[in-house]
Image (tube, rainbow, N blue to C red):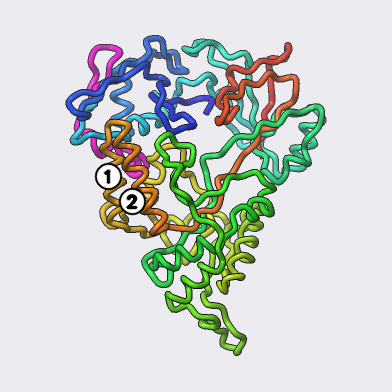
Amino acid sequence: MLTVEGLTQVNADGRVLPRVAERWTWDNGGRTLRVFLRNNVKFHDGKALSAATMVDIIRRLIARPGSRDRYPSLNDITSVAPDGDTQVVFTLSAPSAFLLEDLSAPIQGGGGAGTGPYRVTKREKSEIVLDRFEQYYLGSPSIGQVIIRPFDALRTTWTSLLRGEVDMVAEVPPDSIEFIESADVQTFSFPHWYQFVLAFELNKPPFNSPTVRRALNLGVDRDALIKSALKGHATPSTGPIWPKHWAVDNSIQGFVHDSATATALLEAAGFHKGAAGDNNGIPGARLRFTCLIPMKFSLLERLGLEVQRQLYDIGVDMQFEAVPIDEYLARIAQGKFQAILVDMISGPSLVRPYLFWRSARTYKGLNVFGYDNPEAERQFQALRTAMNEAAVRSATARLQRVLMEDPPAVFLAWNERARVVRREFQVVHEPGRDPMSSLWRWSVGAAPVQTVSLQ
């Protein structure tokens, strides 16, 4: 966020804005993209960013393993070439609406040098030191140096903040904000582009049934969940599309908590009370499954317990399997779970839901869940090639309806994050965005060296 940038950046409403690119034009019915670079951009090693250098970076990105899964529009590029010193021309096999969003991928030159407002001058386990980049094309940062240090416990971080030993806590969970508030600090909350999701392995019963997934969605009271587990610092979610995206149809209502309808749907699907009985004769639930969670992630644990309690009211018994974080991540990547509780990126662009929920048969990508709906796939493909706003709005609305009828998962809440900063800092905070992204524009008294603590 402070050291590397992309050609573009994605705004909080999902629109693409220029960054290192100054502007762009589309030609040939959306099959040619001409990107105009700023003419005063330099890497941290002092070298100027040229069109030829940018082409080399793009080609290396395309060739890097996993890039085509993370940036799907790279599959549409048939050639990329410089045109003079400041223009890069992409030739595409088909119109590729996601290309501008994917060009927000970090730009790094030789030796990993970035173009951002700060450059890394020290990288060790105990701390990372960033010095301001005097030749930054948008102006030299006011704060001369940022030192990032990890802390083992949030309580230790708070103590250091209140003592003035550090100037900022970069990651504060929503349930902890009230404990750190004081006259000496200021808190900046912002909507996170991640949401809590109860996801399933969809190729096997019972979760291959859309009826079961609709029932589980109706069985969750998201407002109560947010109040209880997240202390009110979240927004209800009922789908994978960022609710503040400019193309979202807000007239389409999401799932509303309805235990009676949820129970009726489970009954209709053949899940009767006591169907999942125990071997010892204890009456069972309608449905029982195991949910994978990571050890020592207290927020996910609290969230999971509240979901467990709510689902129990409709006769569903969700049990937990807690594993170390490395195993948790490996099993997600391998699809080795029955259900998982996960905090996953889903916004602000339409590329995010495309990566995780488009057809598992036609494009594996990051879809480790097995979701496969032909109509959803048609709308995802329409979004990928839509080159005007009307077409994007139309496809987005149709996709919203499909994902309500056949929900891929139980989408719980879009979470919030907070940064806590000492009051002597003049923080530039753009609505809807992480204030950390504008740290280079902050100002503070006469102290040029600041310390940022990371939990």
Q: Nearer the viewer, residue 149 or 74?
A: 74
441, above or below 432, in the image: above
Disc with the residue nearer the chain's start (2 vs 1): 2
Q: Amino acid at mark 2?
A: Arg
Residue 400 in picture, x, y percent from top left = 39, 48
Q: Residue 418 lies in magenta, yes or no?
A: no
* Residue that carries the numbered disc 1 in the rendered image: 381
Q: SS class of the residue under badge 2? A: loop
* Residue that carries the numbered disc 2 in the rendered image: 358
3, above or below 359, in the image: above
Number of residue marks = 2
**Quadrant in which the C terminus is drawn:** top right
Residue at the far front: name it: 251
Classed neighbour count for the residue bearing mark 1: other residues with Cα under 10 Å, few (<14), some (14–19), many (≥20): some
To which quarter of the image does residue 34 belong? top left
Q: Residue 68 lies in magenta, yes or no?
A: yes
Horizontally, residue 366 falls left or right of residue 163, namely left
Residue 211 in picture, x, y percent from top left = 42, 67
Tell me which residue sits at (53%, 47%) in the image.
195
Q: Amino acid at mark 1?
A: Gln
Please report the bounds of the magenta region as a residue range: 62-89
